[in-house]
Image (cartoon, rainbow, N blue to C red):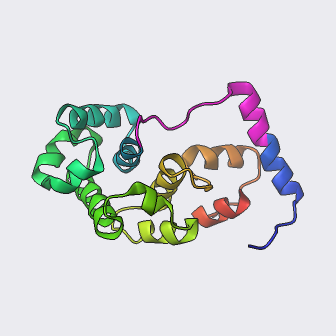
Amino acid sequence: MTERKTTQMDKSLEDIYLLLFNKFGFRNWWPGDTQDEIIIGAILTQNVNWSNVEKAIENLKQNCLLNLKSIHESEISIIAPLIKPTRFYNQKSIKLKNFSDYLFSNYLGSLDSMFGQSLETLRQELLDLKGLGNETVDSILLYAGGKPTFVVDTYTQRILSKLGIQTLGWQYKEYQRFS
């Protein structure tokens, strides 16, 4: 890995982080009691507000399906109605199955083995799964796997835009390079 020279932009990002941290403190940003719950939540939160995800998570919990093994062993027709509050529930049930099937096919169901992969390798593997985009994958990597990656969400884009740092037309990768 090559060393990166610290620039004024790096200092600005650190200043922004410290300003927010000093104002709001540690936020325990991603709710979830287990890695499975965090991964499931990251997939379910696509294009929906968190309160609807909480309803779906509670439905899965009440039906003993709030873990990747149970999702792997269940039918989509069982999962989909339980996650209905998240909108696009038929597609999201497929995404949950795709992720759990990938985990069990490639890592025998072991998140430790999966997260033992290098960040670059694992990120690309997850991006290759149908229905998982940059923000979802980076949320899984950071919050469930503890991998050092920067999740770019709408709030990140708004903050950088308001501070005059973001360039119009930036794509996800440009935001990540900035971090």
Magenta-colored stretch includes residue 64: no
Q: Nearer the viewer, residue 148 or 12?
A: 148
Q: Quadrant of the C terminus?
A: bottom right
Which residue is at 36% across, 41% downward? 37
Residues rendered magenta in the picture: 16-34
Using residue 114 as the reference point, say whether residue 130 is left or right of it. Answer: left
Task: Using the rendered view, name the quadrant where residue 166 is placed.
Answer: bottom right
Q: Is 110 placed above or below 25 here? A: below
Residue 34's spot in the image, x, y percent?
40, 40
Residue 110's spot in the image, x, y percent?
37, 58
Q: Nearer the viewer, residue 149 or 24?
A: 149
Residue 126's spot in the image, x, y percent?
42, 66
Q: Nearer the viewer, residue 145 or 82?
A: 145
Which residue is at 68% across, 27% downward? 25
Q: Is residue 176 visible?
A: yes
Residue 132's spot in the image, x, y percent?
39, 61
